[in-house]
Amino acid sequence: MRKKIVAGNWKMNKNFEEAKALVAELLGMVEAEASTTTEVVVCVPFPYLLTVQQLTAGKSIKVGAQNCSEHTSGAFTGEVSAPMLQSLHIPFVIIGHSERRQYFAESYAQLAKKTDQALANNLTPIFCCGEPLEVREKNEHEKLVKEQIEASLFHLSATDLQKVVIAYEPVWAIGTGKTASAQQAQDMHAVIRQHLASKYGAAVANSISILYGGSVNAGNAAELFACTDVDGGLVGGASLKSREFTDIVKAMKA
Ligand code: PEP
């Protein structure tokens, strides 16, 4: 059975005091809403990982990083490796967020290596894919998203693929307030699942959690999460507000 997951992506927001305050609020609110069937994750900036990990220890909120290096160790100034994250017992890491693809020119091959690093170090990769607006306007979104998945994930064994969480995030919906309609989300999630099935078989494809991301908020979450192939959300802006993020978690339970 695939897991339901609501993951927050704080991006490069909050100073340390604000970050601790947000976690304290979330612990007070989300904890009461957490269910055994929904995993709640907060992906925080690197310097806060250990503190947030300690603050949430034994609670229902799990911690994730927002990136990791494709290298194991060495002369890569400024980078953070998957073994480092593992040594902090961090369970999740976002790989291939569209902002990393766009601003840091992360390539398909690099993302394949980052995914390998995450898996080799017992981290669950939340692998992001999704098309920019001009690609959707040309009606080439299915082709591009299939290509992104194929190029960076299809080298994995079925066993490893089943450890990956996929997040479909249309770039035109990220941070713009424009959400994909529930139908657009469901259609793409079904395309992704079908593509996974074409290589790994239906049983494997059906066991993989596919999250939707792109301006998810307390008002639209329930409709998106009700779609057959939507197993949760990757939430940016709304994850910075404790009440709103909690309401999104609640929408998953409904
Ligand atoms: C994201 O950062 O992955 C995201 C979906 O952001 P937002 O919810 O703000 O659109």
Image (cartoon, rainbow, N blue to C red):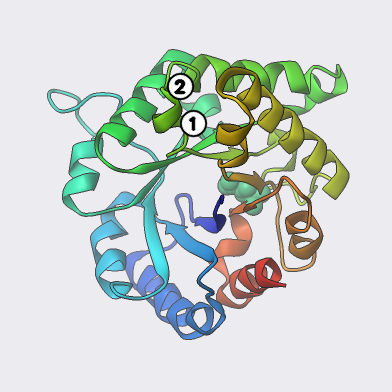
The relative height of residue 231 versus residue 82 in the rendered view (above or below) is: below
Q: Which residue is under mark 1?
A: 96
User: Which residue, as the protein is rendered here, is positioned at the far left?
Assistant: 74
Residue that appears at 30% across and 75% down: 58
Q: Which amino acid does label 2 sit on?
A: Glu
Residue 222, image x and y in percent?
77, 64
Residue that appears at 40% across and 80% down: 24
Q: What element carries label 1?
A: loop
Residue that appears at 49% across and 64% down: 40
Q: Which amino acid does label 1 sit on?
A: Gly
Q: Is residue 51 rendered to the left or right of residue 134?
A: left
The relative height of residue 142 versus residue 24 in the rendered view (above or below) is: above
Looking at the image, which is closer to me, 113 or 76? 113
Q: Which residue is under mark 2?
A: 106
Q: What element carries label 2?
A: loop
Estimate the spatial distance between the alpha carbons at disc 1 and disc 2, rounded to whole Å: 7 Å
**How many callouts does the rendering have?**
2
